[in-house]
Image: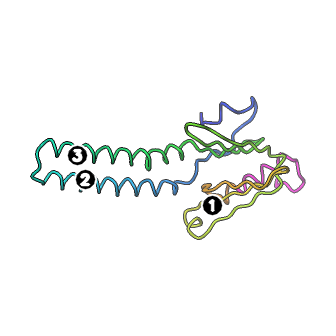
Amino acid sequence: MGYPDNVLAADERVVLHRHPHWKRLIGPVLILLVVTALAAFGAAVVNHTDWGANAKNVVMAVIGIVWLVVFGWLVVWPFLNWRTTHFVITDRRVMFRHGLLTRSGIDIPLARINSVEFRHGLIDRMLRTGTLIIESASQDPLEFHDIPRVEQVHSLLYHEVFDTLGSEESPS
């Protein structure tokens, strides 16, 4: 099924699997629109000059190459990074994996989580996203930015932690 299936234990189940919020892609989409508009404008200007065919072809090729480099670097790369970033809650742990060429990640057993917090400003509230802060027994608090529906994730994680611990405070 999804990404984390190959790293799960035999009887472990995924409770939640999210990528960062789509707001991370707003900048790359705007860059795509602006760079494409600039490239089209430049191509139109070059096309209406009285330069020779070879000169026009060279300048058009340069415009195309610059557009392609900017597109790859500032549009495709952020999209692939977004797509390869995973925030996963299972019935045993919280997993965070990210990276395209080199991958890194962290696993936090639910039994080691001391507190779960969330934070979001006005724009994050409007977009229904925010930062999830998890404090575990042996580490400084870990912040996971741009988690979609962060309040729902916060509540879900809180309930999973108490269900795992078998706490009397756990909701029925």
Q: Mark 3 Cα within 10 Å, few/some/many (few <14, many 20+)? A: some
Nearer the observer: mark 1 or 2; the answer is 2
Residue 60 got which mark?
3
Sequence-wise first label, 3 or 1: 3
The quarter of the picture where the N terminus appears is top right
Residue tagged by mark 2?
40
Tell me the SS state at disc 1. Answer: strand
Q: Mark 2 Cα within 10 Å, few/some/many (few <14, many 20+)? A: some
Residue 107 highlighted magenta (yes or no): no
Horizontal and vertical percent for residue 135? 79, 55
Sequence-wise first label, 3 or 2: 2
Q: Amino acid at mark 2?
A: Ala
Q: Residue at x 48, y 45 (%)?
A: 77
Left or right: 139 in relation to 40: right
Q: Quadrant of residue 37?
A: bottom left
Marks 3/1 in contact by CB < 8 Å: the verdict is no
Residue 130 got which mark?
1
Q: Residue at x 60, y 56 (%)?
A: 146
Sequence-wise first label, 1 or 2: 2
Horizontal and vertical percent for residue 159? 78, 53
The magenta span reads: 154-172
Q: Residue at x 66, y 30 (%)?
A: 6
Marks 3/2 in contact by CB < 8 Å: the verdict is no
